[in-house]
Amino acid sequence: MSKMPTPPTLPTATVRPILDMNAYDGQVSAKADQGNDLLMRRTRNVGAASVLFYRDPIEMVSASGCWMTASDGTNYLDFYNNVPSVGHCHPQVVSAMADQAARLNINSRYLHQTTETYLDRLKATFPDHLENVVLTCSGSEANDLALRTAQRGTGARGIIVTECAYHGNTATVTDISPSAFKRGKLPDHVVSVPAPGKLAYGDDIAGGFADAIVKAIAVLSDRGHGIAALIVDSIFSSDGVFSNPRGFLRLAVAVVHRAGGVFIADEVQPGFGRTGDAFWGFLRHDVTPDIVSMGKPMGNGFPMAGIAVRPELLAAFCEDVGYFNTFAASPVAAATGLAVLDVIRDENLLANAMICGKYLREGLQHLADIDGRISDIRGAGLFLGVDLSPNGAPEDANGQLVGDVINAMRRHRVLIGAAGKYGETLKIRPPLCLRQSEVDFFIEALGKSLRECG
């Protein structure tokens, strides 16, 4: 099959906040909504804060492995949700959760064997200098604690992020999440830099990104804030997924350390083996984080998160305020987290992420050879970003095509999300238990969807 002809250059695309990507718009579908009592109840109950996927939202009732089932009986292949990372409703994780809940569940102010066993196992995945782990219930809480710890430890306030970063939704963390903003701008103590891609930095991504960090530090110094931390999601998920070349973060982290700041590796999305070649995303870059935040896949759907941190930084923070979380580090959380680590090990899910990730990438490249609108494929393991551009030019990114493809794939029973400054990137994050037959199903659905959106 020959490659598609290249259409003309498109108008400049519109920047899209992360929650607007593939989101239900109640105004557009108001007439259809009148026959959907559940949707009307959701809108009435949650109001303006309601966020739902798809132009026609889906009611889900069950899930297993890589599949979710809707109320009408339709089975969907989940290529979006990295929360149930080892598979939806994994029986070993569910059993551990339920068994512990039936015996004891209490806050962390009591000693419990399972809690310490879990923390020891978790710490063994980190470099030795990250000796302390503090558990929270969400990635937002983890990043909030990480920022406060960094600012206390350095005596500075300034934070550097990438320009489409998303790190959570507390007040402190929303301030460093540009992709969450629908209006307004970053506060004075936060400076953003372009994501580490070729469009911004050409062929020298490591050098260009490090130079951008140097300039950002100078801006923070001029504003009187100094540099407290560089925080990045180590696969730059919301920016559009930027993973390579391996090691490109080293120069930037060295710049931050020389300036007296700390490096916070946000592993909420790439952590727990998703990249296949490393348990944590930062390990692909041979860098030394001072703090690592984690969440989402940690409990495979149970609300778990936390930070791993240098003891001296945590000690300084606790001199002022300390930290306690009622529901974190409970026996049920520890039992659940321990089961997740067991499943990752026993089912060889890192190796599966590498093998299925390679097979998936080959399928995507085959589609790119056929359809010139696939302008780039990036990522590692089972975390990939696929840019779509109506004319095939990366610089002419536009989220409209991605939105159309996402909704077409829903018709072909595949769930997938979007990322990037303009929503121009298909964000691919299936559960780590993915099988090659499911990759085939996905590639076939994507090919059909692209043809329908021609």
Image (cartoon, rainbow, N blue to C red):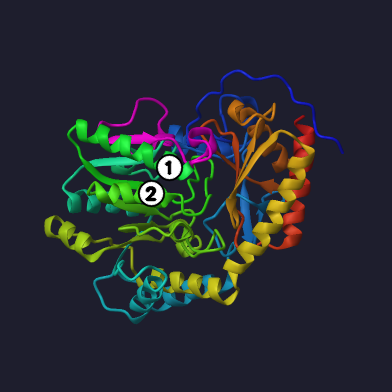
Figure check: 120 above or below 377: below
Quarter of the picture holding the C terminus: top right
Residue 291: image tag? none
Quarter of the picture holding the N terminus: top right
Magenta segment, which residues? 176-204
What x and y, as percent, mark residue 173? 33, 43
Q: Is residue 76 visible?
A: no
Q: Is residue 401 visible?
A: yes
Residue 207: image tag? 1
- Dot 1 crowding, Cα within 10 Å, few <14, some 14–19, many 20+: some
SS assignment for the magenta stretch, majority: loop
Label 2 residue SS: helix
Query: Which residue in the rendered view is the most extreme toward the bottom?
Result: 113
Label 2, on which residue?
A: 251
Figure check: 332 above or below 153: below
Figure check: 397 above or below 160: above
The residue that appears at 21% across and 35% down in the rendered structure is 221
Callouts 1 and 2 close, C-beta under 8 Å:
yes
Q: Earlier in the sequence, mark 1 or mark 2?
A: 1
The residue that appears at 35% across and 73% down in the rendered structure is 119
Kind of residue indicated by mark 2: Leu
What x and y, as percent, mark residue 331? 36, 73
Q: Is residue 74 magenta?
A: no
